[in-house]
Amino acid sequence: MRGVILDTETTGLLPERGHRIIELAAIEIREAFPPAGQAIEPTGMAFYARLDPERDSDPGAMEVHGITREMTLGQPRFSDVADAFLAFVRGSMVIIHNAPFDTGFIDAELARLGPDYGRLHDHAMVLCTRQMAYERLPGMRHSLDALCLHYGIDTSHRALHGALTDAMLLLEVYRRLVAEPGREEVSA
């Protein structure tokens, strides 16, 4: 099954309080669950958008991603990219670290567009790498940063979070998680 590694940056933590997606990135991989011995490889296809969230970011979110309101002025809104984004992920296994967070934001954005857009789960399957890490690596922290440290993935180029950078880091983490014992237990 075709896979898509996805990450978002947001204006805050709670979509129900009006926080919005400010960056959206997705990297296509050939197979979400390749046969043993076959590498997880990107296809070279990606989706990226910096979005105008039509609001300021909360101070805590700004500390994480550093994207100012001025940096988003003139950028497309989620409604401008929704159809292209859904076409990109449709029918795939979308692989997200802390999937409930990102899907909550995507679902809130889709809900603003009307009921015909549904939810992300209506367009693609979703796999949470944080849950995979809990199951495969008990007794340790399971943030993306902690997993990068555990697997020796270099994050020195990343001063702040960014959706595309974090999606690329997640690709590396996912490769290692899939290689962990218990791989055969992963299912759609």
Image: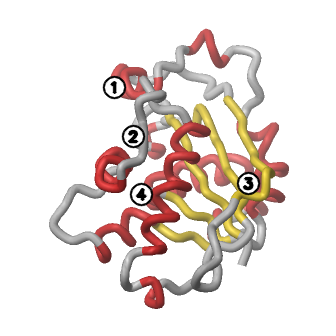
Q: Which residue is mark 4?
A: 98
Using the image, determine if residue 105 lies above or below residue 97: above
Query: In the figure, residue 94 lies in which quadrant?
Result: bottom right
Residue 4 appears anywhere in the view: yes
- Name the element at disc 4: loop
Mark 2 nearby-residue class (10 Å; few <14, some 14–19, many ≥20): some
Kind of residue indicated by mark 1: Gly
Residue 107 drawn at (x, y percent): 59, 56
Could you give the CA–CA distance between mark 2 and mark 3, rounded to whole angstroms? 22 Å
| Of pointers 4 and 3, the one earlier in the residue sequence | 4
Could you give the CA–CA distance between mark 2 and mark 4, rounded to whole angstroms? 13 Å
Could you give the CA–CA distance between mark 2 and mark 1, rounded to whole angstroms? 9 Å
- Name the element at disc 2: loop
Farthest residue toward the top? 70
Q: Which residue is mark 2?
A: 13
| Of pointers 3 and 1, the one earlier in the residue sequence | 1
The mark lying in front, picked from 4 and 3, is: 4
Q: Are marks 2 and 1 in contact (CB under 8 Å)?
A: yes
- Colour option used: secondary structure
Residue 131 drawn at (x, y percent): 37, 69
- Please tell me the numbered disc located at residue 60: 1
Kind of residue indicated by mark 2: Leu
The mark lying in front, picked from 2 and 4, is: 4
Q: Are marks 3 and 1 in contact (CB under 8 Å)?
A: no
Residue at image coords 78%, 62%:
116
Could you give the CA–CA distance between mark 4 and mark 3, rounded to whole angstroms? 25 Å
Q: Quadrant of the C terminus?
A: bottom right
